[in-house]
Image (cartoon, rainbow, N blue to C red):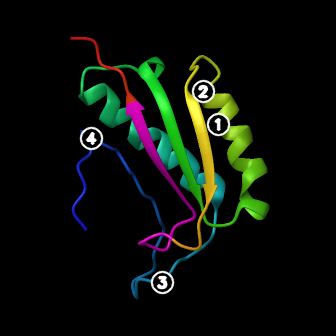
Amino acid sequence: LPASSSVTPGITFVTLDDAGNIVDYDIEAQTLSVFRNVRYIIEDAGAAWEDIVDVQVFLTNMKKDFSTFNRLYAEHFSHVQACRTTIEIGSLPTPIAVELKVIVAISA
């Protein structure tokens, strides 16, 4: 599906083997990769991590992954006062465990 990173960056990460199967399920690695990729997009647009105003988090397994995700979020968003919504969903379009939709306020 087409996506526009300049409107709603939804960055995904998954480790696949040669057959396209998930090698491992590592919410920490996926979350850190998503944060890193979102940061690249934000900085490429001329904004900063602190310009984030809203984050929607989609987790495929809230019970299993929320505490790890929340710990990493607290570490990486300690200076960001963004509104956050965390939603559990049945699945994502690709075999991943976490996806973000981020809104950034960019000064003119």
For label 1, count other residues whose C-alpha is less than 10 Å away and answer few (under 14), some (14-19) or many (20+).
Answer: some
- Dot placed on the residue nearer the N-terminal end, 2 or 4: 4
3D distance between C-alphas at marks 2 and 4: 21 Å
- Dot placed on the residue nearer the N-terminal end, 2 or 3: 3
For residue 39, above or below residue 58: above
Find numbered disc 2 in the image and state the secondary structure of the residue it sits on: loop
Instruction: Check whether the beta carbons of the residues at disc 1 and disc 2 lie within 8 A of each other.
Output: yes
The residue identified by callout 3 is 21
The residue identified by callout 2 is 77
Name the residue type under label 3: Asn
- Dot placed on the residue nearer the N-terminal end, 3 or 1: 3
4 or 27: nearer the viewer: 4
3D distance between C-alphas at marks 1 and 2: 6 Å
For label 4, count other residues whose C-alpha is less than 10 Å away and answer few (under 14), some (14-19) or many (20+).
Answer: few
Q: Residue at x 25, y 56 (%)?
A: 3
Percent position of residue 52, x then y: 45, 25
Name the residue type under label 4: Val
In the image, the segment drawn in magenta is: 92-103
Task: Give the position of the C terminus as an image quadrant.
Answer: top left
3D distance between C-alphas at marks 4 and 3: 30 Å
Instruction: Check whether the beta carbons of the residues at disc 4 and disc 1 lie within 8 A of each other.
Output: no
